[in-house]
Amino acid sequence: MNEALSKRISLELQGAHLLVVWDVLADKLSESAFFKDLREVKRRAVWALQDLCESALAANGFSGRAKGEWDHLMNSAREHVKTLPVEFLD
């Protein structure tokens, strides 16, 4: 069981989905009172996911854009995510 906790697990997301997830983690969640009230272990897990998202965005050419271009990219990503199928919703 402990070996499974250390195992590296890959997730696969479309670029648009990754951009929106990163935006939620970095811009929305990290500044919220909810996040600040989390225990440190949960904040560390969120920070690790945020770092992973940032690395994946940079590795896939999504970083280093001017503000106007970034805003357009994020708006396009949000619109694209609306078209993605979501499973397991009630």
Image (cartoon, rainbow, N blue to C red):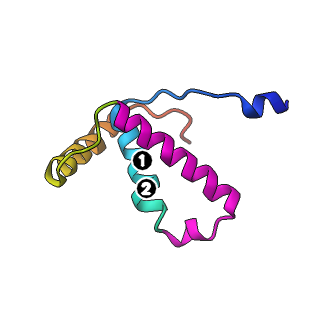
Q: Amino acid at mark 1?
A: Trp
Question: Is residue 80 shown left or right of residue 48?
Answer: left
Q: Quadrant of the N terminus?
A: top right
Mostly what secondary structure, the magenta segment?
helix
Do tag 1 and tag 2 residues touch (Cβ < 8 Å)? yes
Question: Is residue 82 shown left or right of residue 54?
Answer: left
Toward the viewer: 51 or 25? 51
- Element type where label 2 sits in the image: helix
Instruction: Give above or below for 37 relative to 29.
Output: below
- Element type where label 1 sits in the image: helix
The x, y position of residue 5, in whole percent, is 76, 34
Crowdedness near tag 1: few (<14), some (14–19) or many (≥20) residues, C-alpha within 10 Å: many
Instruction: Give above or below for 76 relative to 8.
Output: below
Residue at 43 percent of width and 53 percent of height: 24
Residue pointed to by mark 2? 26
Is residue 54 in the magenta section?
A: yes
Residue pointed to by mark 1? 22
Toward the viewer: 56 or 21? 56
Magenta residues (range): 32-59
Residue at 64 percent of width and 65 percent of height: 38
Question: Is residue 9 shown left or right of residue 26?
Answer: right
The x, y position of residue 52, in whole percent, is 50, 40
Is residue 18 in the magenta section?
A: no
Residue sticking out furthest to the right: 1
